[in-house]
Image (cartoon, rainbow, N blue to C red):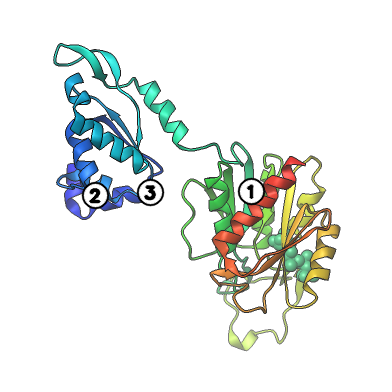
Amino acid sequence: SEEEYREGIGHIDVTEQLDLAIVAPATANVIGKVASGIADDALTTALLAVACPLLMAPAMNDRMYGNPLVRKNIAFLKEQGVHFVEPETGRLACGTVGQGRLAEVDRILEEAAKVFPAGDLAGISVLVTAGPTREAIDAVRFMSNPSTGKMGYALAAAAKQRGASVVLISGPTEIAPPHGVSIIYVKSAADMYREVMARVPASEVLIMAAAVSDFRPRVSSSRKIKKQEAPVSLDLEQTEDILSAVARVPGKRLLVGFAAETDNLLANAMQKLKSKKLDLIVANDILQKGAGFGEETNAVTMIDRAGNKIELPTLPKTEIAGRILDKVVELKAI
Ligand code: CTP
């Protein structure tokens, strides 16, 4: 609203979360301003700041539409990647008949859909786990690990971008959920197990990037344990192995696991691939520089169900996510 716009930098805020900007009707004036980089009102200022594709549906008098200056502006904007929906021919607001009527809403929506090529995961349901889990010792203490969730969040965002409908089941992290992804927050391995298992039947691809705690205290106190009564040792039990449980659910789905190792990386990864019946395992030597917990980059080797190894160099996690999904698409097709 006008009020919100005046409040701060509304014209910039509004552009940040957009997938597509549509200007309908686009007047000769607005087309001219955008073509020249003029930003003298809320709309043109926002349009100058958008990072997403822009679709314009011109509507104006037919002679204006045919004017060489307007043609030149449209041609220039097309070269810049702006999309246009041609106006229709018919009776115009000024009473004459010609090309200049705003296209029907259905045609505008049709063109809008064409702006986004169907991704190679279009319509596929993908479930991703991410982040660490916390296993309670008492009301104020827990066992956990340094996972930040970056790899899993990058995978969820990339899958969404490629057209998948994505559910992200996340342990406690500091990062914002990717746009358009359904997010479910969990704390413990037991919570994550429950939330994942409930969604296995509806998922075609499962990518288990979470660093699930393998152990938890056998008993946890709902009160704070006082120093004087502190146990000298913690009695631990194993948590649910979510990945193995998923692999046992009947039905055909693609299962991707991670193996974070410090020793015998490939041998351990290969063993996990087989024992957990995975389609793909992403092995990651957490002692290597530029790889592992909290880093922006990762260095992984993927091993697929046929035993093919793909070693990737150190790359940003967003890039690694893309490579993993390329492999998912390839394995899904076989
Ligand atoms: N994983 C899981 N549930 C657990 C533990 C791990 O789903 N309770 C998943 C992880 O998300 C990862 C894969 O299993 O995708 C491998 O995790 P990792 O801890 O490396 O394997 P483990 O089977 O626990 O083997 P180990 O601890 O002996 O290395």
Could you give the CA–CA distance between mark 1 and mark 2, rounded to whole angstroms? 35 Å
Q: Which residue in the protein does label 1 denote? A: 127
> Where in the figure is residue 202, as x and y percent of width and height?
67, 39
Assess disc 2: are there few (<14), some (14-19) or many (≥20) residues with their C-alpha within 10 Å of its C-alpha. many
Report ligand 1 position as a quadrant: bottom right
Q: Is residue 30 above or below residue 5?
A: above
Q: Amino acid at mark 2?
A: His
Q: Earlier in the sequence, mark 1 or mark 2?
A: 2
Q: Where, quadrant-wise, is the C terminus in this rendering?
A: top right
Q: Evaluate whether residue 159 shows in this view.
A: yes
Could you say which disc has been placed on residue 324 in the image?
A: none
> Where in the figure is residue 184, as x and y percent of width and height?
56, 52
Could you say which disc has been placed on residue 17 in the image?
A: 3
Q: What residue is rendered at 66% in x and 55% in y?
A: 324
> Where in the figure is residue 234, as x and y percent of width and height?
72, 80
Q: What residue is rendered at 78% in x and 40% in y?
A: 252
Assess disc 1: are there few (<14), some (14-19) or many (≥20) residues with their C-alpha within 10 Å of its C-alpha. many
Residue 316 relative to residue 204: left or right: left
Q: Which residue in the protein does label 2 denote? A: 11
